[in-house]
Image: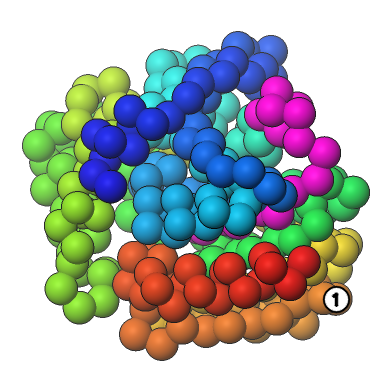
Amino acid sequence: MDYDTWSENQQTATVTVDGHDLEVAYYDDGDGDPVVFCHGIPTSSFLWNEVAPPLSDGHRVIAPDMVGYGNSAMHDGFDRSIRAQEVMIDGLVDELGLETLSFVGHDLGGGVGLRYAAHNPDTVEALVLSNAVSYDSWPIETIVDLGLPSTINEMSVDELQEMFEGLFRDTLTGDPDEAFVEGMLAPWDSEEAMISLSRNAIGTNTSHTTEIDPSEITARTLLLWGADDEFQAISNAERLEDDISDAELVGLDDANHWVMADRPDAYRDRLDEFLEGD
């Protein structure tokens, strides 16, 4: 599925975050126990396009664009931190009438998952974290720089696209999947999106993971990690495995930060096995 098709299949809901009514675009398909997927920066829900749809045969898969990302609200005037994204997830869960769920998070989405699982133990039955931000492992320098208004003010949309294309191509294992690269670039192809990205980047607040005690997470947890990640090292997953009482670490070799794109079949199979064991 390409990015345009993914976007056409999305639905929208209005969710209140810190008093702001924000439009949230989300992919929603299938029946059965719900599985919520949450992406990170600088991606969108399209990150899950090779993982979520096949799982809809046995689960209801829900993959929102975080606010400030993808096809969700991008205008100025609201917080985009993972604390705010947790509020968005909580509102979307209420809007969709979900009582219990599994949560799958990557990068910043993993940080959202850590917070949401810690704060909602009766809702999150299973938690999957992939190359997730945790403790004080983030933000990386590239994202910090993007959060400076001066950086974005001096950059054109074409320059941003070129920078991100290089980032994705350099950090994907093997020959990059062109549809994946194009889908990752697509949401950031406008001035509004570029400013939104800067606001998203400046919202990367390390305090929002350091204030969480992973030992409070009661959900059955799978740490499904790209073993060769240069951004969120597998040592962070080892630390999470020690701190979360019911956690298992599975490192996928030949996979960098974008583990679900580097090893989609292995990632999907291991995720499906874990979810079926719920």
On the image, the x and y values in percent for residue 174 come to: 20, 78
| SS at mark 1 in the image | loop
Q: Quadrant of residue 95?
A: top right
Left/right of residue 63 with respect to residue 150 in the rendered view = right
The residue closer to the viewer here, 233 or 32, is 32
Q: Return the residue at label 1.
A: 245
| Residue 35 shows up from this direction | yes
Report the magenta residues as a range: 92-107
- Residue 43 sits above or below residue 194 on the image: below
Q: Is residue 83 visible?
A: no
The spot of residue 251 in percent (x, y) is 52, 84
* Image quarter of the C terminus: bottom right
Residue drawn at (43%, 29%) of the image: 10
Relative to 143, 107 lies left or right: right
Front-most of residues 115 and 127: 127
Q: How many marks?
A: 1
Please state the horizontal and vertical placement of residue 51, each as a whole percent of the image: 44, 59
Q: Is residue 190 left or right of residue 107?
A: left
Q: Residue at x 69, y 68 (%)?
A: 276
Q: Amino acid at mark 1?
A: Ser
Classify 96 as above or below 254: above
Label 1 Cα crowd, 10 Å radius (few <14 / some 14-19 / many 20+): some
